[in-house]
């Protein structure tokens, strides 16, 4: 195996690029690589910010005053509907699942 250090590899790669691309096109190639790296960093930062919003709850209903008192998994679809309805101030007693879904949908639509 060749005993070449890191700095020698950089020189070999630069010489290879000059031979393949040409010295006239090398600045344009460097700009393109720089733009791609910049776009990657902007996207990574944006995704990190969105994940932080999700983790802190700022992208949920908290800013609208909605709190869901869910302590753990619910037993059924009906139990989930009742928890959501109560969090929205809807009395679920005597309502069918379809009526609850409709009222929840209407309430969430009016909050936006």
Image (spheres, rainbow, N blue to C red):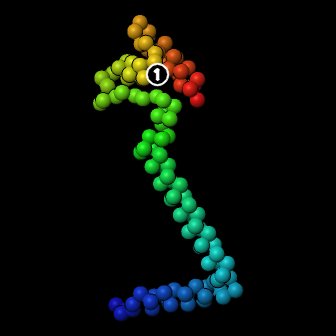
Q: Residue furthest top?
A: 94
Q: 94 and 33: which one is in front? A: 94
Residue at the image point whose x is 64% and y is 83% from the top: 26
Image coordinates of residue 43 in percent, x first then y, are: 55, 58
Q: How many numbered discs?
A: 1
Relative to 61, say whether 21 is above or below: below
Relative to 33, say whether 13 is above or below: below
Relative horizontal placement of residue 27, taking residue 11 as reference (left or right):
right
Quarter of the image where the N terminus is located: bottom left
Relative to 41, say whether 5 is above or below: below
Residue at the image point whose x is 45% and y is 91% from the top: 8
Residue at the image point whose x is 41% and y is 19% from the top: 86
Q: Local crowd at mark 1 within 10 Å, few (<14), some, or many (≥20)?
A: some
Residue 77 in sight = no
Image coordinates of residue 47 in percent, x first then y, are: 50, 53
Q: 68 and 40: which one is in front? A: 68
Quarter of the image where the C terminus is located: top right
Residue 30 in sight = yes
Q: Quadrant of residue 36?
A: bottom right
Image coordinates of residue 92 in percent, x first then y, are: 42, 13
Image coordinates of residue 98 in percent, x first then y, are: 48, 14
Q: Could you say whether the residue bearing mark 1 is in a helix, strand or loop?
A: loop
- According to the picture, the residue beneath numbered tag 1 turns out to be 88
Residue at the image point whose x is 67% and y is 78% from the top: 28
Q: Quadrant of residue 80?
A: top left
């Amino acid at each position: 195996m060749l005993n070449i250090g890191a700095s020698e590899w950089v020189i070999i790669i630069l010489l290879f690029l000059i031979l393949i691309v040409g010295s006239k096109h090398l600045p344009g190639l460097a700009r393109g690589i720089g733009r791609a790296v910049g776009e990657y960093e902007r996207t990574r930062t944006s995704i990190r910010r969105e994940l932080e919003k999700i983790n802190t709850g700022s992208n949920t209903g908290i800013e609208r005053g909605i709190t869901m008192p869910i302590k753990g998994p619910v037993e059924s679809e009906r139990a989930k509907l009742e928890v959501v309805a109560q969090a929205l101030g809807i009395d679920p007693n005597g309502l069918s699942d379809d009526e609850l879904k409709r009222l929840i949908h209407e309430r969430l639509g009016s909050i936006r």
